[in-house]
Image: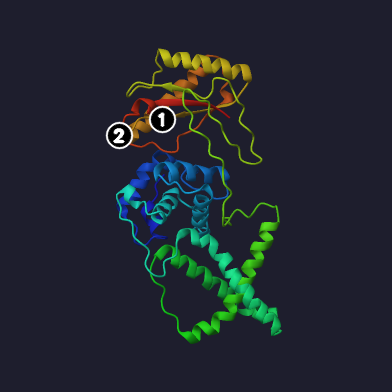
Amino acid sequence: MAEDWYADVKKYAPNADTNVVAAIVRYCGIALQNRDSSLVAFTDEVEVGRVRENFLKKKLGLTDSDADLNQAIAAVGVKMKQDPTRNRVTVYYLLAEHFKKLGLFGGADVVEGPGAAPLAAVGAAAAGVGAAAGTGAGAAAKASAPLAAAGAGLDAAATGAGAAATQAFAGGAAAAPVAKSGLMRWLPWLLLAGLLLLLWWFFANRQPAAPAMDTAQTTAPAVAAAPAATPETPAVTAAAPGAPVAVAVVGLPANVYFDVGSFAPGDEGGKTIATAAGAITASAAKIAITAYTDKTGDLTKNQELAKNRAKAVRDALMAAGVPQASIEMRPPLSVEIGAAGTSDAQSRRVEITSQ
């Protein structure tokens, strides 16, 4: 899928570092070859949890609370609300820039100057404007100023306020000075716009109905993180509200390990597959297969090797009696390349998990 990732990032970060963008593209790897996985769905709690756990915590090494991390993700969603693509590379760049983690991708982290707004403050801006608007609204009520008279300038004021928040988030530069006379002229409209934002926020939080797909929540709900699956410890999957709960299957998750550059299961891998097949057929469970490679070698070859390993395990399970309809081939979020590490042997694996 051809995509100018740098051009998309520059829409929100005009001074974006090309080397950082290239490093994030390499990190995302195979996920960018599929249209769905190359985008971020901010209204999907599972997707928000995936960005928080895999990118913010594991890749960036953040230890902030889930609520704070969710708020930062939601603020990016507000920033990109008018963008129908919401590319994963752009989302990751903005998050890394906000948390001063561009250095992990070979870039330089910039400290905000006067007038720059932190990313998380974008989500809280509506509440602050609403508080000021409440005070202004009380004074307006005492003066018996009719609310309908402000309708003519409402759209212009709201648009101006939104543009100011966007400039503060993306540019990081000091705001242009405003003449006192102009400020006093627009102050009543800004207060009215803030009042309407406060009313919208109040009613939106009282109604249980799901928000519109194009509107990102200011603070995204925390998503329970699933502990990492190991050969000794079964994985526990936290299901989103309303989503089907994964069936617990004794013996799953299971990992099939491979030799360097090989996609043929060895003797131990064959035993693991046979045990998993028995558990799956006995419980009539549905499973997912995800393949990984180590960090050495060429990225394109690693991606092809991961696919072949997943197919080999799938074919072996079907040969052992598992129906094809019960198997989902699930690609990994990313395939990285780089220097070999101590966990390379654990990386050359195919995971079999219940759904």
Q: Quadrant of residue 194?
A: bottom right
Label annotation for residue 298: 2
**Tag shown at residue 292:** 1
Provide residue 151's location: percent of width, then percent of height.
Answer: 65, 77
* Nearest-to-viewer mark from 1 and 2: 1
Q: CA distance from mark 1 to mark 2?
A: 14 Å
**In the figure, 345 relative to 185: above or below?**
above
Q: Is residue 120 above or below residue 144?
A: above
Residue 64: image x %, image y %? 47, 49
Q: Looking at the picture, which amino acid does disc 2 mark?
A: Asp
Q: Which quadrant would the N terminus be assigned to in this image? A: top left
Residue drawn where x is 41% and y is 12% of the image: 267
Left or right: residue 130 versus residue 170 is right
Label 2 sits on a secondary structure element that is loop
Task: Please tell me whether mark 1 sits on a helix, a strand or a loop.
Answer: loop
Tag 1: residue type? Tyr
Q: Earlier in the sequence, mark 1 or mark 2?
A: 1
The disc at residue 340 is: none
